[in-house]
Image (spheres, rainbow, N blue to C red):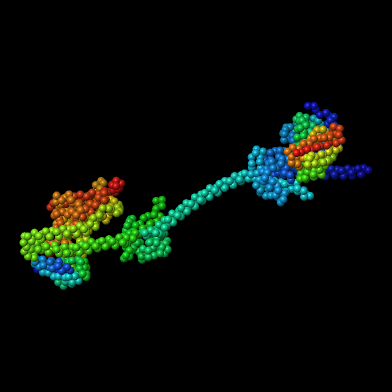
Amino acid sequence: MKGIAKEEVQKLMEVKGETRGVTLTIDRDYILKNKGEEGLKKVEEELGELGYPIKYKEIETFGYYPVGLRALSLLAIKKVFDFDDKKIEEIGFFGTRVSLVAKFFIKYISSVPKVFLREGQKIWRKHWTIGRLVPIEFNKEKKYAVLQLKDFNLHPIYCIFLRGYMSGLFSLIIKSPQITCQERKCPFKGDEYHEYLIKWQ
Amino acid sequence: MKKILIVEDDKFLRELIVQKLIKEGYETSEAIDGEQGIKKVKEEKPDLVLLDLILPGIDGFEVLSQKKEDPNIAKIPVIVLSNLGQKEDVERGLKLGAVDYLIKAHFTPGEIIEKIKNVLK
Amino acid sequence: MAVAKGKKERIRRGEEDKVSILLEDLASLESYARDLFSFLPLPVCLISAIGIILDANPSFEELSGYRLEEIIGKPAEEVFDKGRLGEISKQTLEKGFVRAEELSIFTKNKKEILGSASATLRKTEEGEIVGYFLGFFNLAGIKKREKELRETQVALANILEDVEEARAKAEEEKNKTGAIIINLTDGILVFGEEDKLSLMNPLAEKFFDIKARDLIDRPISELSTFPTLKPLIKVLTEEVGEIFRKEVSLKKDLTLEMSAVPVLRKKERIGNLIILHDITREKLVEKMKTEFVSLAAHQLRTPLSAIKWTLKMLLDGDLGKITEEQRDFITKTYQSNERMITLINNLLDITRIEEGRYIYKPALTEFEPIVQFVVDSCKGEAERKKIKIEFRKPKKKSRRAMLDIEKIRLAVENLLDNAIKYTQAGGRVIVSLKNTPKEIELSVKDSGVGIPKDQQGRVFAKFFRGANVIRMATEGTGLGLFITKNIIEAHGGRIWFESEEGKGTTFYLALPIKEEFEGFLREF
């Protein structure tokens, strides 16, 4: 698989903003669970080669780290294990299960899906210092919700991750055998912002 | 002459035996009940007593008993002449001092005389 | 300007310090919370208000068989018993908690585990319901033990039922026995431990004119102080050996037949049972019989004696001379009269005819003392007749046999009586005992008149008397040997004799010693 270009790395690391350690621990937990210690080591090695060695076990959940690192972690994982988009989405979904921050939110939001609309932005701000998550619509009868993510252009890989994450979140607050999330709009495709459509049954 | 006292309440039998005794040469004395019997033994001290057991008043056993207690007359021989034949009666009679016990119905007068002769020998 | 910059710098650094401290604290908190949650041995899960499992601890993962990422987001009703869970969540939402409600969980392997669930409602500060924590207490072990306990209970109940049944039966038996004892037509006394009276039935009370309750639990020694009981106690304490059908005279009109039987439990003697049979009537009948016999004898014999004597005197010529023809008639009359006298004797003895046929109760006894007793009791009569009696005993120890003492004594007495009776004055009677391997042999040898040869065959027959002795003896029914033979043969023994007329007779009897007797009985 082709390596990640140095320029790409440079560009990523120049993106202004910080992310909470929890976004990285999601990756850590996923790799540990599915690829074990060895797998994690490999990712750490890859990151080292890219010039940004991180020790996942030393990541503080509530600490602040450069946003670029978040994307880099995903990219390294993708390269090391040759993950496809589906897998990345899976990591996103998994994240909702293990993220402590998500757990904090769920206790507030799960009771009333509508609250999500109100509180949805908070989730974003807990994780990122850049960008705004804007709940647009929550249609109980038609069984869909629309969310927009503005002022956030990290890396397409993260869009895939987010799809999974959103499905995961919604699966915790809505009883449905299947929940899907698709990105209707994306700045990497020329749109102004990200727009996500979540559908359930 | 030897004196025989006969203690027997039946008149006919008494008379018969007395008759026989006299014929044999004995002197006789008669008592018709137990009381008279013991009285006569004491008074007359015969040489032998023929004693019936069933008697009016005191019976023959009682007579034997009283006789035994009186040292004056205790030694006088008594032949019991009775129709009581049960073993117990015989034993009792002999125990009370009778020298012999004859059942009237089993002995003829002659046989009785023989017995008397033997005792007085 | 530099000062201001420095101040800003200091402030910034101060802020940075605070932040790092805060971060440290958060990390510690995170760690603590995780420890608490992770190491909780009780399976706990967080279920949202709409019934989705939001979180679960490692214990829950273990119990359910699902991994964390599998269980989070799963509707709780897919994991728990839907109906029960509905009830629990309803109650929790209403009351705020439930405690120890039965709930089943279905593991990933489709196994049902029964448990006890407790739940607590979780609300936000604003009072909005988040969901509820559900703790699941695995009752599998307890349920198993419960089941075992139930089974044990059932088994116990069954046993109790059986025991109750057995007890009821025993009670019934006891009541039956009690009823029997109370209504028994014999008096019963039971002595238990330490010879204390433990039971007395109503008839026994009547016999002794005393109430059982006054006597219960008193020892025998105390009972002898009660006047009516004295005769009974005397027998109980003095009698050596087994008491069997012993006659005890209580009052003038009450005679009892007493038997004592040991009460055994597992071969150990735990008491004595005294049975008292009222034989007053039997005794009375016996007495009446005896009296009747005596009376009949006397009454019948008296006139017959008179006739006999008169006829004899006639024949003897004491009443005058008689012709030959008269002699003839009178002789015949005399003979008829004699027959009458004999008949009366026979009739009177018919009552004794069965005597000796059956032996009441054999007991292991020495034979020699019985013979000695008889010899001693006949000494008087023998002396009177000037007959010498000799008793020759064997050198060896006296043997024992199963004997009815009374009856055997009677038999020996009969032989010795006969010997004395049919021996003239100055004669001799030798009584000898001999031990043979299997028997004890007694011989009574007299120097008497003997038995005529032509009559020897009929010696043991009923009413037989030798022609030569009828005149001799004071009394003779002809039943003596018949009865004696009965007695000896009933004991399994033998009786025989040797005789020569004019020389003497020897009678022999042989009795089997114990072992042989049992054999004889077995053959019976």
Residue C489: % across, % down? 25, 50
Residue C374 as seen in the image, left or right of residue B17: right
Residue C223: % across, % down? 38, 63
Residue at (15, 56) in percent of width and height: C470
Of C155 and C185, nearer the camera is C185
Q: Outermost residue toward the right?
A: C1
Residue C363 drawn above or below residue A46: below
Q: How many marks?
A: 0
Residue C75 drawn above or below residue C427: above
Q: Which quarter of the picture shows residue B94?
A: bottom left
Residue C390 drawn above or below residue B43: above
Q: Outermost residue toward the top?
A: A2
Residue A132: % across, % down? 84, 40
Can the viewer see residue C193 in this picture? no
Residue B63: % across, % down? 20, 68
Residue at (25, 48) in percent of width and height: C439
On-image quarter of the N terminus of chain A: top right
